[in-house]
Image: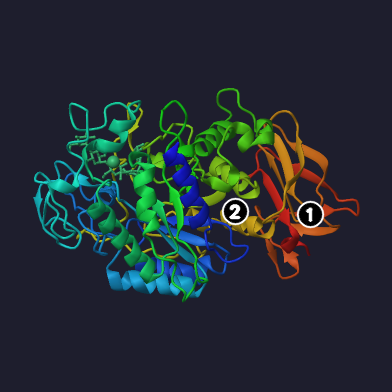
């Protein structure tokens, strides 16, 4: 009870729920494994002009560098120190990125790995991204410095020292997650080192943090660390602004640790959203699009203003974390775009768009044996730059879902309808649905195996609108389909079930 009261108090006065994006810039994009120089350029040339609010970056601190498998993406989740040199770049490049993104009004959230250091069998040497020496066996990380006193050895009660039983809260928080050396966040010294790292990032201008593996840390330890954070940099943020916090907690029910234990500290990832949306759009388990009528809290998700939502993330798109087969990814692009359009049109949660790299996916007995593969890289292991094709898509193996025009235009849709309630819901009892956002936008989706042809109340003012899925408005004409709204707000929605993208979306800014 005491802990809960303390959390409510801290949460109330520290207000770490505000994303600090510019007004009406509503979405985050995760530029997974991108280099800092590419992100800086992307903020200026694409994200700001298209209304993206913020970027989630990969962990910026020094990490282990592995040979076997060769430089997996997940080596960045094995910290060696809090120096800012990683596969994505060095501190100077980091500083330049944050400055340039903030200057065009795009915020940077750092993915922070503070629950652990590298794996127990990480060896000893200088195989680290800044070349710092470490000895995993001796739990010695001189570049921080941490020694074996700074890890949770005595506190873990499992035979192996690893988490064996997710029903035992003490194991989940005091033992090693997949053998990763578990930091003693109960110690003032460790808390101080972590706060120093996060404050260094705040000094450089980041606006917030994606807190990795929050389930594996005690909320009261995290509360102490967050209370030591500085206010955001007044070069870009108003005085007294607190770093935005969103915590990675995979809560799909059935475990004693729940998302709600973290509500006092900031927002929390809503993993049910990703798994359920995939199930519905795939029409598995008897699910139908019509059931999305009460999507959100009606599906036993957390309160909307606490939720961070996504169609897929860097783990579940490749079977890591809670990666169920239902999760939609760029590999299933037609359904993926449908799910992303629904997410971005629907008012629930703070939305994060995934931006991936392609890898040689190869299933053996239902498991992707190449799920470890890192970003597109050169022979020396350095990450390839994000190249651009003449049609504005990305090359060099970068997928850039955030540049797919259907997704980009729905990010703009969300900005235009920001703050408007869900309105005029319609469904056919099966997989055809439509809904509006107040009087500013309207979307219709046909995921049935037959055509949709209905006249619906949109709530929009009369006029001719450009559909933003098949095209968009350019000057005084539409490059794709058009929807005509009559004086009483009605419009005919005709969507062939075989269309490339069986979705129509219109909003005030696409009115001719
Ligand atoms: C393995 C065995 C151990 C064994 C050890 C021996 O699993 O039992 O003792 O070898 O050396 C990698 C390997 C893993 C290996 C481990 C330690 O996959 O096989 O242990 O390293 O060497 C990412 C990857 C993990 C990876 C980790 C560290 O997903 O596979 O582990 O990085 O490199 C839970 C958590 C949730 C977590 C999710 C994946 O509650 O918090 O699992 N999600 C976050 C990140 C995720 C990251 C981590 C947490 C860890 O989103 O990307 O894991 O920082 O649900
Ligand atoms: Ca822990």
In this rendering, the label closer to the viewer, 2 or 1:
1
Query: Is ligand 1 closer than 8 angstroms to the Cβ of mark 2?
Result: no
Q: Is residue 14 visible?
A: yes
Q: Residue at x 50, y 46 (%)?
A: 8
> Seen from this angle, which residue lies furthest right?
487
Q: Secondary structure at mark 2?
A: helix
Question: Which quadrant: the N terminus?
Answer: top left
Residue drawn at point x = 51 percent, y = 43 percent: 311
Around disc 2, counting alpha carbons within 10 Å, would you say few (fewer than 14), some (14 to 19), or many (20 or more)?
many
Q: Vertical placement of 440 versus 221: above or below?
A: below
Q: In the displayed structure, does residue 39 sit left or right of residue 480?
A: left
Q: Would you call the spot at circle 1 few (<14 residues within 10 Å), some (14-19), or many (20 or more)?
A: some
> Looking at the rendering, which quadrant does residue 216 occupy?
top left
The answer to whether residue 53 is left or right of residue 146 is right
Please state the horizontal and vertical placement of residue 114, each as a whole percent of the image: 30, 50
Furthest residue toward front = 2
Q: Nearer the viewer, residue 124 or 493?
A: 124
Q: Which mark is residue 406?
A: 2
**Is there any visible trace of residue 15 in the rendered image?**
no
Pick whichever, 192 or 451, lies toward us.
192
Q: Name the residue carrying label 1.
A: 439
Q: Which mark is residue 361?
A: none
**Left or right: residue 398 compared with residue 121:** right
Residue at figure coordinates x 60%, y 32% from the top left: 299
Asked whether 438 or 305 is in front, the reply is 305
Relative to 329, does residue 142 appear above or below in the rendering?
below
Q: Is residue 412 above or below residue 139?
A: below
């Amino acid at each position: 009870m005491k802990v809960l009261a303390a959390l409510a108090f801290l949460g109330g006065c520290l207000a770490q729920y505000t994303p600090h994006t510019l007004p009406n810039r509503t979405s985050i994009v995760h530029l997974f494994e991108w280099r800092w120089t590419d992100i800086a350029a992307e903020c200026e040339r694409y994200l700001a002009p298209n209304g993206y609010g913020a970027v989630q970056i990969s962990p910026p601190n020094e990490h282990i560098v592995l040979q076997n498998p060769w430089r997996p993406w997940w080596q960045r989740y094995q910290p060696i120190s809090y120096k800012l040199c990683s596969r994505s770049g060095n501190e100077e490049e980091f500083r330049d990125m944050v400055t340039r993104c903030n200057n065009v009004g795009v915020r940077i959230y750092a993915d922070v790995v503070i629950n652990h250091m590298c794996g127990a069998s990480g060896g000893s040497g200088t195989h680290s991204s800044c070349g710092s020496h470490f000895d995993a066996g001796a739990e010695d990380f001189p570049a921080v410095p941490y020694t074996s006193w700074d890890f949770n050895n005595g506190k873990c009660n499992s035979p192996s020292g690893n988490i064996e039983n997710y029903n035992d809260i003490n194991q989940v928080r005091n033992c090693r997650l997949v053998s990763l050396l578990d930091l003693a966040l109960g110690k003032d010294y460790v808390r101080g080192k972590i706060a120093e790292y996060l404050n260094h990032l705040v000094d450089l201008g980041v606006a917030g943090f994606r807190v990795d593996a929050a389930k594996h840390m005690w909320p009261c330890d995290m509360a102490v660390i967050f209370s030591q954070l500085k206010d955001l940099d007044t070069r870009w943020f108003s005085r007294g602004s607190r770093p935005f916090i969103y915590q990675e907690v995979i809560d799909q029910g059935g475990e004693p640790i729940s998302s709600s234990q973290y509500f006092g500290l900031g927002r929390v990832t809503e993993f049910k959203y990703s798994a359920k949306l995939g199930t519905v759009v795939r029409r598995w388990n008897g699910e139908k699009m019509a059931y999305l009528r009460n999507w959100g809290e009606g599906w036993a998700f957390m309160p909307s203003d606490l939720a961070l939502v996504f169609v897929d993330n860097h783990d579940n798109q490749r079977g890591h974390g809670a990666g169920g087969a239902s999760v939609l990814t760029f590999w299933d692009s037609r359904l993926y775009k449908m799910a992303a359009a629904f997410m971005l049109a629907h008012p629930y949660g703070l939305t994060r768009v995934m931006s991936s790299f392609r890898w040689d996916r190869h299933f053996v007995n239902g498991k992707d044996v190449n799920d470890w593969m890192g970003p597109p890289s050169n022979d020396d292991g350095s990450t390839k730059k994000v190249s651009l094709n003449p049609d504005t898509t990305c090359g060099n193996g970068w997928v850039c879902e955030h540049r797919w025009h259907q997704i980009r235009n729905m990010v703009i849709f969300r900005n235009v309808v920001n703050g408007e309630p869900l309105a005029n819901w319609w469904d056919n009892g099966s997989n055809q649905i439509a809904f509006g956002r107040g009087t500013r936008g309207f979307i219709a989706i046909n995921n049935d195996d037959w055509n949709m042809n209905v006249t619906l109340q949109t709530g929009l003012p009369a006029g001719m609108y450009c559909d933003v899925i098949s095209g968009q408005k350019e000057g005084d004409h539409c490059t794709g389909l058009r929807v005509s709204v009559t004086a009483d707000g009605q419009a005919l929605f005709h969507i062939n079930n075989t269309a490339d993208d069986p979705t129509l979306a219109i909003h005030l800014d696409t009115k001719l």
